[in-house]
Image (cartoon, rainbow, N blue to C red):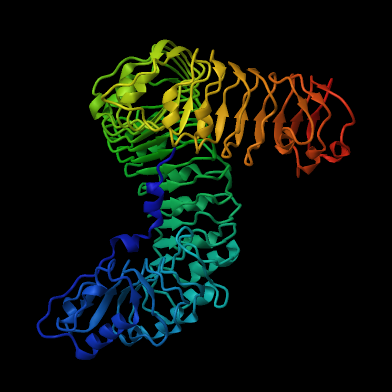
Amino acid sequence: MKIPYFSWLFMIPICSLFVSFGIFVVSGQCLGHQQSYLLELKNTLKFNSTLSTKLVRWNGSVDCCLWEGVTCSKERRVIGLNMFNESIMAGLDNSSSLFSLQYLENLNLAYNCFNSPIPTEFRKLKNLSYLNLSNACFAGQIPNAISSLTRLVTLDLSTFYLLADSMLKLEDPNLAMLVQNLSELKELYLDGVNISAPGNEWCQVLSSSVPNLRVLSMSSCSLSGPFEFSLLKLQSLSIIHLSNNPSNAPVPEFFANFINLTSLHLSSCGLNGTFPENIFKIPTLQTLYLSNNELLQGALPDFIGDLTVLSIVDLSVCNFSGSIPSSMANLTQLVYLDMSSNNFTGPIPSFSKAKNLTQMYLFRNHLTGKIDSLNWKDFLNLVNLELSYNSLEGNIPVSLFSLPSLQILQLSNNHFSGQLNEFSNVSSCQLEILDLSSNYLEGPIPKSIFKLRGIRDLLLSSNKFNGSLQLNVIQQSRNLSILDLSYNSLLIEYNGTSSPLFCFPQVSTLKLASCKLKTIPDFLRNQSKLTVLDLSINHIPGEIPNWIWNLTNLLQLNLSYNLLEGPLYNLPSTLTILDLHSNQLQGQLPTRPPSATYLDFSVNFNCVIHDGIGSNLFIAPFLYLSKNKLSGSIPVSICMAKYHRVLDLSDNLLSGIIPQCFYEMSDTLIDVAEA
């Protein structure tokens, strides 16, 4: 489970984060007509006065140069206006008094929602050097008026798709017309603007029109490749953000010649070929995002350890291979590392010098070796460690449970073995998710685990844990939501009593398959949030208690391979998956819950079926009724089903004519052998 806040941090334009407008305190009043324009602007804008922190405080009795968000020059002219995130909902059009503030040099209207096109009267603000209209619910064609603002140094028209109802576009005028007069431009943010241009076009336009560009941020603009060599003319580039464009091209070698590069974002671009090693020689490189380029190959060179300012590396879901260089131990500024879903091999090197590392994702590779020799105690800021789906072995170091910031620890589907020892400092442990499933761990489950008060997801299935465990122990885990102890060698007991100090947590998923359980725990009757319950392959006898059908949120129930008997009553309407096969149930087939897609009643019933009794079961997409003693004919109600994927009626006592619709269900796997 990745924590995505780093991605969001770098989606927000630098200008939005770091540009602020100061206020010059000057003697005398600001120019009278300037104050009138501002008050008129306030009156025409529709904004939420509860959420506003600037506009709501503008007061005609106070010098407008002292208003929050307003910057004045020494001549008492309004030269800066910052209305960032002022909850503005409407009120900006070509008649706005904003366009009378012709001395404006800096204007920030970002993170509002004007719900309109960009007014063409922006052309009047000839002195603007900084214009930020990002994420402000502007839509439609970007007007040619912007291209007349020839003093612009920073232009931000970006829109992040998660925040926008509609998109800005550059068609007529196109990108070339927008930037043709903006030769002073140093920062260009057009993320989310629909530009739809081929590589030979947009690369040439930028290289010829904005030679001083330092920031190029055009993610999600429908820009295709390839990357043209002409881009190399932009030697001042320090930030290149072009993620989520259909480039479908290799990363060019000449990118290594951007000697001032600090940030390179090329995620989800359909990149292919081999990633140029020399890019790892750019000494200024701080952030590198290449994720979700499955055809992008490469290896990490040893000299990656020379990048002393590298703080973020995301190579996830690519095709990198080879070992992780031990030189990465020298990356002292590393904060975020994601190399998941690649083909890396060999051991995990020590990252102990990366004292500020908070996220480490190395899952779904081919990593081997032990991890108990790594200096985990030094990772005081580590929040998330995910090493699942590798071939790591040896013991799980108990020091991991003492890390003061660790919230998510996922080590599943490896070859870890040995006993998991008890650990101290339980009260200071921040663990919320612990997944050690599908390993070879043995011995008793440490009691310390159930004392983790913040634990939410506890997944220990498919190991070799043994010994007896009182289910009541989970009463200590107040926040527990998901518990899976299935497929170990445990003997789980439930004595039906509860501690007066604790009650059972409200869980959403409980999986205790193959745990030698002899009863359905009655505390479940009060589990209003329970959606998934798996008590299969146990020794539970008797009838299924009626209260289980009253669990109003239950979606998936598996009680297969037990000793359950008796009839089935009305099944809850919420059920989508019900598996009761290999029990000793009797009586008539039940009515199908309306949402059920998977039903397995195999090896149970001895009854007659016909239209009207249990016949609506036959419209379930996945239905297993094999190895019962069902008699009668196949109900014609099966023809009511829009489609079947699997229908198994084999090994029964059915007779009569097979309905004609069986032969018309080309997408259906039907087994009626010996029926």
| Residue at the extreme bottom | 33
Q: Quadrant of the C terminus?
A: top right
Of the pair 327 and 139, the residue shown nearer to us = 139
Q: Residue at x 32, y 17 (%)?
A: 447
Relative horizontal placement of residue 114, taking residue 598 as reference (left or right) = left
| x and y, in percent, of residue 633 in the image | 84, 29
Q: Residue at x 49, y 56 (%)?
A: 242
| Residue at the extreme left | 27
Residue 629, above or below 153: above
Residue 480, above or below 391: below
Of the pair 566 and 267, the residue shown nearer to us = 566
- Number of callouts in the render? 0
Picture quadrant where residue 133 is located = bottom left
Q: Quadrant of the N terminus?
A: top left
Q: Residue at x 59, y 57 (%)?
A: 226
Relative horizontal placement of residue 334, taking residue 67 as reference (left or right) = right
Picture quadrant where residue 628 is located = top right
Relative horizontal placement of residue 161, taking residue 329 as reference (left or right) = right
| x and y, in percent, of residue 398 in the image | 32, 19
| x and y, in percent, of residue 654 in the image | 83, 24
- Residue 6 visible? The answer is yes
- Residue 375 visible? The answer is no
| x and y, in percent, of residue 224 in the image | 59, 59
